Amino acid sequence: MMDEMKAKGIEEKEAETATFTTMMQFCKDTSAAKSKAISDGEDEMGQLKADIEKYASDVKVLGNEIQKLDRLADEAKGDKSSSTQQFRVEEADYQKLHSQYEENVVDMEVGISNLKSMMSSTQAASASFIQKMVSKPKFPEHAKRALLAFLSTSTSASEKLEAPDGAVFESQSGGIESILQDLKGKLLDEKSTLEREYLKTTGSYQMLQQTFANQIDQHTDMRNHKAATKKDKESALATAQGDLEQTAGIKAQDEAYLTDVQSECAQESSDYETRQKLRAGEITALNKAIEIISGGAVSGAATKHLPNLVQYPSLAQLRSSLTRPSQSVAASFLQAQGQRISSKVLEALSSHVAGDPFAKVKKMIQDMVFKLMEEANEEAEQKGFCDAELGTNKMTRDHKTSSIDELTASIDEMGAKMAQLGGDISNLSARIAELDSAIQTATMIRQEEKTKNTQTIAEASAASDAVERALAVLNDYYQSAAAATSLVQRRSETSQKAPFQGQQSGSTGVLGMLEVILSDFARLESDTKSNEVMSQQSFTKFMSDSNLDKSVGEQQLKDKSESRTETDVDLAAANKDLESTQAELTAANAYFEKLKPTCASEVVTYEERVARRKEEIESLKEALKLLDEQPIA
């Protein structure tokens, strides 16, 4: 009975050891897994916090940039509105002044026409007419002064000559008409100058308006782009904050679970040690009791006084038996199991079981069991380490490889963008240079044309004046000749020879020719002035359009240059990140190569080794059972 109790105690002790080993393996695996999960959670939380800070900073920076762009757009709108208001005031002033010039020119033309029709009137009538003209409120001051000065001179001259009013008027009509013509020409010149200045003002206003419109569009587009980016950053910020909260919760749960597991495992380990001590003590006591009962005092007395009692072998018999049938059975069993599972350990042990003493055999088998269990624990720890390190290393290598692919694609994209921006900048620079050249050429042509027209107008005006003086000389002469004819008419009647009256027969042709020449010079002057105005208008429009195109091109050139600078900075940062990530991937690959001999180059898998070792342990336990259960030979 004590042998059965001893065998049962040993069996329960070994079973508890196996259960405790499994439990400890669970504790180690769970602690390792949870510790890694907690560490990963801390790393992820650190990354999320860094992302949150960056997103928050980006949102703040973008918000400030959006406010700045809104302010710039509002300023451009205000400048555009102010420019429009100012132009409307200048436009109204121009319309008013232009209308006055037109009215004055019309009045001057009417005055010249009326003056011609009044050539037969008296000086009083002409003076009255001139007084009416200069009394108009919108009549130019310099014209008033010229006419009043002429009127004063004409009156003084007539008083000195004491000639009839009609004669004085007739002698001065040509002068007043010339003055009026000069005044009309000056008014037309001033009107043309006003129109040219208005065209230049209009061109500048349109160019300025387009510049403000471009600025508003640019600020608005950039503002909308940054607003969309800010919205994305805010969404990413909210997501990161949610992920951080979730990760913190999971990490707290893992920490609580790890604490519980470690506490439970520590308690279980303490309880196991206590139970193992008790079981070991129990087995020791049973061994002592068996030894006492097997002694001569007990067995001799039992044989003498208790003959009907079942006889047990004496302790001497037990000790004298060096080889038992159980050893042969156990050796055969170990030999068969070793061949079945291809275990060299069991095959080698079977020979020792057959030949060694009984006690030594049992101790050797027990030591082998404990050794195999220790190897199992060590390999499990190594397996956990390898799984954790290989898993982390694989995640690192995959993440770095993905990052390298993304960075490479981004670098290629930014390189293509840099090339595109370079081409655009080159084309815009060439376009601006062409516009500058065209503006310079047009300006030179316009200056030459204006110089030529000015000279032509001056020469035509001088020629007209000369022809007018020639006509005045001839007209005076032929009028004087006609008057002299009437004085000598009586003499010519008594004389055989007619008096000389000048070349009256050819006078009409000469005067007519001079009048045609005068008309041609006047038309040349008028046409040249008209061409000058049209050329100036065309030049003004060309300059306005060219300056507008140049302003737009320069703004686009500035935008693309800034974009290229930003892209160049991003490209440099991406190349730096790529270099750093490539170095990290190289380090991860090197660590993987270091892990491979220990963790990755397995001929027999971990599961196969665990299964084989388990069968070896079970076979050894079965051999111990056979040794304990077989009767003594």
Image (cartoon, grey):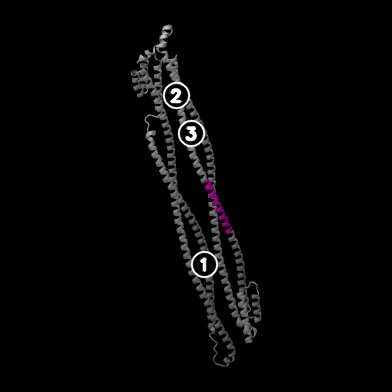
Residue occupied by mark 1: 535
Residue 431 visible in the picture: yes
Residue occupied by mark 3: 34
Which residue appears at 50% of the width and 42% of the height?
Answer: 48
Does residue 63 show up magenta in the picture? yes
Residue 394 found in image quarter: top left
Q: Amino acid at mark 2?
A: Thr
For label 3, count other residues whose C-alpha is less than 10 Å away and answer few (under 14), some (14-19) or many (20+): many
Q: Earlier in the sequence, mark 1 or mark 3?
A: 3
Where 110 falls versus 603 (above or below)?
below
Residue 596 found in image quarter: top left
> Where in the figure is residue 70, as x and y percent of width and height?
56, 53
Where 305 falls versus 584 (above or below)?
above
Residue occupied by mark 2: 17
Magenta part of the chain: 55-79
Secondary structure state at the residue bearing disc 1: helix
Nearest the viewer among 295 and 166 is 295
Residue 333 visible in the picture: no
Nearest the viewer among 178 and 430 is 430
Residue 471 placement, left or right of 312: right
